Amino acid sequence: MKPFWRLWKKSHCTWRSRERRSFLLFLAPSFLGVLIFVIFPFMDVVKRSFTTAVTSEFVGAANYRTVFANEAFRLAVKNTAAFTIVCIPLLVVSGFIAAVLLSHISSSGAVKSFSLLPMAMPTAAVAIVWEMIFYKPSFSVLVISYIWKNIGYTIVLWFAGILAVSKETIEAAQMDGAGGIRIFRYIILPDLKGSLFTIVILSVLNSFKIYREAYLVAGSYPPKDMYLLQHLFNNWFVNLELDKMAAATVCTGVVLFVMIFILQKLWDNEI
Amino acid sequence: MKLFEGIEKGFCNVILGILCVIILIPVFLLITGSFMDSYELSDYLLPVFMGAGGMNGWRLMPDYPTFQNYKKLLFETPQFFVLFWNSMKIVCCILAGQLLVGVPGAWAFAVYRVRGAKSLFLLYEVLMLLPFQVMMMSNYLTLKRLSLLDSHAAVILPAVFSAFPVFLSYGGFRRIPIQLVEAARIDGAGEWAIFTKIGLPLGKSGLVSALVLGFLEYWNMIEQPMAFLSDKTLWPLSMFFPKITINQAGASFCASVIMLIPAVFVFLAGQDALEAGIIYSGLKE
């Protein structure tokens, strides 16, 4: 197989070359856009993270040092980490419990619809309700609204995973006299690792969107325990502190990339 | 044994029923609130306005149900319509663009076995997972260079090239048996014809779920307009007054309900696609 970019190599009109050409043509519009809007500018961001904002002089790791020494950055990292560590296990476990209960009843469709409904609710429409119920913005408002919004797809994914567990294996185990708990531990749980991977990835992705709730409920400068990385990015952006922002973008990108990579490796090894 | 099963079922039903009720509370508060007059609202919400505490009480049915809030919002706030149609325009352009750009891209990944395709797909996967804040500066630099800042294109174009619809459409296309595509090829069908005649009709579930999830996502977009649109007349509806005050609580409720309507409509119409999409987003080979 030749790599797809070796198009210029003149070959006979074989299927391989036709396949490469078609692949390129179909992908071209999307990939060009990704290059222009993401890849190239991201390289620029990496470059800028090593230079000053105004004069573009090379300053080495100075921007990174400034960012790491920045009080607001530390606070934001701490809060964002706390939010992730509290919310993701909470969401994963509560979704799982609900899905297990759901697999025992007949009207599962209705429950799924209700639990997915918050996904359709625009944050700006619901923010007013959060203000009413929790008159004072705080960390727990973020946690509650996050769980409320994201529980639906968690249940759906867990539920699909539970349904996909092989019925024959369970029956065979029952035949052999395995109890409910052992079936759960040794047959159902190992089968659900794929679902767990997906759920964790999606909930991390969506955890960044909590900024909408945080911003709508408390504005750009919320109480200290609600100040997230997203606030910091936004405030630096508004003040056009692009050198710091570039360094923080690179750091956040690298951390996320490593996290995705580790999760992916874990997933690949388990199956 | 039968009795035990009955109790277990009942228990599950009760717990899940409670869960549904809790989930519905915010929706319920919004809808009833939008029909209350300002006296009733200020009665319940006074502590909230004063910043002194949560709401004190609420009614299942407003005491004096009224359309006054809706009338005020729909007939006396022209700005509201501007934002509503801005939202519609932005969302429709994004979805159309995603269809034109992302769906053929997904087809390329799903059908052609080419070296390098795998690593490219991995790149798309990572891009899909990066949050807006990481992309913000990249987007900004490009938009500035193309002098698109402060126009609708600034929020539309980056979203058009999002990796998410590629991923979801890919999930749909992968369900088409590859033998079908090969058979069509042997019969002499061109690659484009195979895409339009086999790929699109048979793989439309992924595509529809990309549309449904996309609509819900972009109808709710806040970060992007906040960063790239400073002209308030360009704002989408999701940027409409976030603050609840004594004078505009009623209008806020109404605006919220109106904002809900298209999203809930899409949700109800596309619920199966939405569920399929959620499952596709976790699809692994």
Image (spheres, coloured by chain):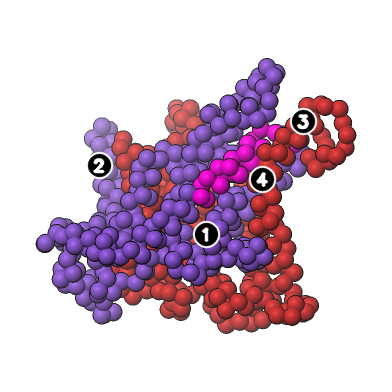
Quadrant of the rendered image containing residue A8? top right
Between A257 and B12, the residue placed more toward the observer is A257
Q: Say which residue label 4 marks.
A: A29
Which chain does the numbered disc 1 sit on?
A: B
Tell which tag, 4 or 3, sits nearer the viewer. Answer: 4
Secondary structure under the numbered disc 2 in the rendered image: helix
Tell which tag, 2 or 4, sits nearer the viewer. Answer: 4
**Mark 3 vs mark 1, CA separation in Å:** 38 Å
The disc label shown at residue B10, or none: 2
User: Is label 3 on the same chain as label 1?
Assistant: no
Q: Report the residue at 55% width, 42% height from top.
A: B99
Q: Report the residue at 25% width, 41% height from top.
A: B10
Q: Position of residue B196 (x, y in %)?
A: 59, 30
**Mark 4 vs mark 3, CA separation in Å:** 18 Å
Q: Say which residue label 1 marks.
A: B152
User: Is label 1 on the same chain as label 4?
Assistant: no
